[in-house]
């Protein structure tokens, strides 16, 4: 099961627009995604559930662990990595 | 007939059916069901209905308030689709054979409770959004007529509510509001401000129990006297209709003359302008005969978002207002926000005494970037306009000096970038902290004008929390202690050729007109709907008579004496 550790640097953390973008990507691939907040130790939760992701309360500077499973497990991780590294499209 | 005495919050008389807005209480019965498959389909069609409602609200928020407010409802749509919550709901329906209402309530409440316990205050507050969505789904399931969502206000009605928050009001169709009456809230509450900006009658602190009011019951609302009547007799109804006709004809007369300037009998001209919170208000202000804007509240640009608005976006919102005003003066108040609001990106945290805390211009030391950002947007938007900028919550000269430095830095940097900016900008302060009134003369070298905020000046001078209903009655701007501070400010300013405006509720009160004219006020700023009656009142007085009125009023011992004295006067 592929996984990655990555830091969320967006000012809003993983909620509001960044969260919506994250969930949208998860839902568009044939894969399940689990997310854990490494900074607070919360999780893992279903990466397709906005409410559970909010409960992780990932704020700016937190490190998360994203793991995936299924037919497109690698693809979904790659897409999520690109999203987070682009700071959710805000450079 | 049941009659309740409340506080008048917006004048006029409304007659119509009561529309009970009670979104919080949703009674859910836990029931066993026979056919889970059928129950699930019933839920899915309720969810679809809820989705339509939320999309409509989102569209409305986008049109009326902008992209970032619409985002609140985008989040609601996501909750509606949440896979984990929905699978929890499905589990309860299929495994425990319970009805959809109770399944939704159980699951959403559990998540909302967990959310509300999060340390991050912004996230914790999102629990309210989860409750909102679950109540909406339950209402869609039951199809009940109690506790209708704001979006379901279809027929013109009198809104009857316990209290209204800013987010409640996004959903109402403004054209369907005949009047508003709330059981709680003071005359400066959000309800009152909303009602005045819509120009509909309102009363607050109605002291009724909303559970006792039948939906659709015929209601008479007298916003002049602060009385609400549920189920009037024929006689009472006829009487109310007569009063309404009388009031409306008076109103029409005022509207006919409202585009003419406000000149006293002896030829003294004052400026009558409006308080606004956005472009819709600005249009309304011009329509009502306002000669400009004396207070543009900019807080809405900062609330309900998670990061600072881009300068360009902010500038385009200001530009919209500038265009509507077409050369009329525009006084913009910079961000006035404090610990009563929760906005993490502004470094706001909840405080024990937010009205005495880190708010308004006091943010300048820690967060000069906020002011710089706002100044930049204003200078860019103000090209070719009569722009005036004022600082809120000023209590000392140092704050103003620092703000001017920031303004100058921003101006120089924009000039260096070759951008067109507002050519001449007047700079002023709000006088709402007693120290600013007492030291008014010391501000002279740094300001072009003063604008007196009587709501806060009253609460700070009299030590009355105006949001606390038990003491709100003490918060009268007619108190001679407050009036003396007003008089001192005007005197100090006039001595040095500066002008003074007033943008608190007192300025829109026709009975206060002779008093304020007499003290020498140059600019009256009020809710757009108050412009016609205040202009009419000004034309009935002579400045010389008003000066006597002011002298006498300032010598009285208390607010009730002042009010009584003013009521007994005959204009001349």
Image (cartoon, coloured by chain):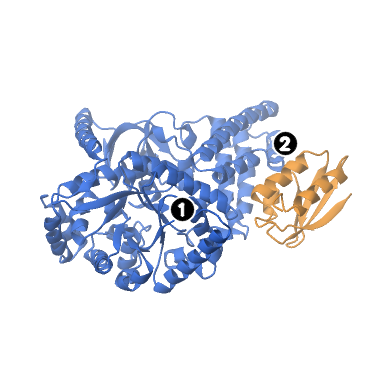
**Based on the displayed image, in which of its 4 quarters is residue B280 positioned?**
top left
Residue B31 lies, in percent from the top left, at 60, 34
Q: CA distance from mark 1 to mark 2?
A: 52 Å
Total count of labels: 2
Instruction: Give yes or no for contact between labels 1 and 2 (Cβ–Cβ under 8 Å).
Output: no
Left or right relative to B566: residue A4: right
Q: Which residue is mark 1?
A: B298
| Label 2 neighbour load within 10 Å: few <14, some 14-19, many 20+ | few
Residue B386 lies, in percent from the top left, at 39, 52
Between B179 and B103, the residue placed more toward the observer is B179
Q: Which chain is painted in orange?
A: A
Between B387 and A1, the residue placed more toward the observer is B387
Depicted B52 relative to depicted B530: above or below:
above
Between B348 and B27, the residue placed more toward the observer is B348
Q: Which residue is mark 2?
A: B95
Residue B120 lies, in percent from the top left, at 62, 59
Depicted B215 relative to depicted B492: above or below:
above
The residue lying at 40 percent from left, 28 percent from top is B155
Chain letter of mark 1 equals B
Mark 1: secondary structure: loop
Can you see residue B209?
no
């Amino acid at each position: 099961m592929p996984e990655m550790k990555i830091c969320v640097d967006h000012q809003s953390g993983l909620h509001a627009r960044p969260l919506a973008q994250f969930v949208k990507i998860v839902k568009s691939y044939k894969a399940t995604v689990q997310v854990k907040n490494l900074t607070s130790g919360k999780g893992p939760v279903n990466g397709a559930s906005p409410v559970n992701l909010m409960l992780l309360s990932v704020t700016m500077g937190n490190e998360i662990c994203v793991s995936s499973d299924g037919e497109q497990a690698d693809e979904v991780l790659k897409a999520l990595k690109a999203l987070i590294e682009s700071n959710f499209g805000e450079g | 007939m049941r009659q309740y005495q409340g506080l008048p919050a917006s004048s006029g008389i409304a007659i119509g059916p009561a529309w009970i807005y009670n979104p919080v209480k949703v009674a859910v019965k836990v029931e066993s069901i026979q056919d889970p498959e059928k129950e699930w389909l019933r839920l899915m069609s309720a969810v679809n209905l809820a989705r339509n409602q939320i999309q409509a609200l989102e569209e409305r928020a986008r049109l009326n308030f902008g992209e970032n407010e619409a985002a609140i409802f985008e989040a609601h749509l996501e909750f509606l689709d949440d896979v984990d919550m929905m699978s929890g709901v499905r589990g309860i329906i299929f495994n425990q054979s319970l009805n959809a209402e109770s399944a939704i309530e159980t699951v959403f409440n559990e998540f909302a409770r967990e959310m509300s316990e999060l340390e991050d205050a912004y996230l914790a507050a999102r629990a309210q959004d989860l409750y909102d969505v679950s109540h909406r789904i339950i209402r869609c399931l039951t199809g009940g007529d109690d506790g209708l969502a704001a979006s379901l206000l279809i027929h013109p009605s009198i809104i009857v509510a316990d209290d209204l928050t800013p987010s409640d009001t996004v959903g109402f169709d403004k054209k369907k509001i005949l009047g508003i009456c709330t059981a709680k809230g003071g005359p400066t509450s959000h309800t009152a401000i909303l009602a005045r900006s819509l120009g509909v009658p309102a009363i607050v602190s109605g002291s009724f129990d909303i559970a006792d009011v039948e939906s659709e019951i015929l209601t008479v609302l007298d916003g002049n006297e602060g009385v609400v009547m549920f189920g009037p007799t024929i006689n009472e109804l006829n009487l109310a209709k007569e009063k309404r006709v009388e009031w409306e004809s008076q109103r029409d007369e005022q509207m006919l003359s409202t585009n003419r300037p406000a000149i006293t009998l002896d030829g003294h001209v004052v400026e009558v302008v409006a308080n606004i919170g956005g472009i819709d208000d600005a249009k309304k202000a011009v329509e009502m005969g306002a000669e400009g804007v004396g207070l543009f509240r900019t807080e809405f640009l900062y609330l309900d978002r998670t990061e600072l608005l881009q300068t360009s976006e902010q500038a385009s919102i200001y530009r919209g207002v500038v265009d509507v005003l077409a050369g009329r003066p525009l006084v913009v108040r910079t961000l006035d926000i404090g610990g009563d609001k929760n906005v993490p990106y502004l470094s706001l945290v909840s405080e024990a005494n937010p009205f005495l805390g880190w708010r308004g211009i006091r943010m300048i030391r820690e967060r000069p970037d906020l002011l710089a950002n706002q100044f930049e947007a204003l200078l860019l938007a103000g090209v070719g306009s009569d722009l005036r900028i004022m600082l809120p919550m000023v209590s000392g000269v140092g704050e103003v000096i620092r703000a001017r430095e920031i303004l100058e830095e921003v101006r120089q940097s924009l000039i260096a970038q070759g951008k067109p900016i507002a050519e001449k900008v007047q700079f002023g302060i709000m006088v709402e902290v007693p120290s600013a009134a007492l030291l008014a003369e010391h501000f002279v070298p740094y300001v072009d004008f003063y604008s007196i905020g009587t709501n806060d000046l009253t609460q700070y001078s009299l030590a009355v929390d105006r949001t606390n209903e038990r003491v709100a009655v003490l918060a009268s701007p007619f108190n001679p202690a407050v009036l003396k501070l007003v008089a001192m400010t005007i005197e100090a300013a006039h001595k040095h050729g500066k002008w003074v405006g007033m943008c608190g509720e007192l300025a829109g009160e026709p009975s206060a007109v002779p008093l304020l004219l007499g003290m020498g006020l140059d600019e009256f700023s009020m809710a757009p709907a108050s412009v016609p009656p205040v202009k009419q009142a000004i034309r009935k007085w002579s400045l010389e008579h008003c000066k006597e009125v002011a002298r006498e009023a300032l010598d009285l011992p208390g607010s009730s004496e002042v009010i009584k004295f003013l009521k007994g006067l005959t204009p001349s």
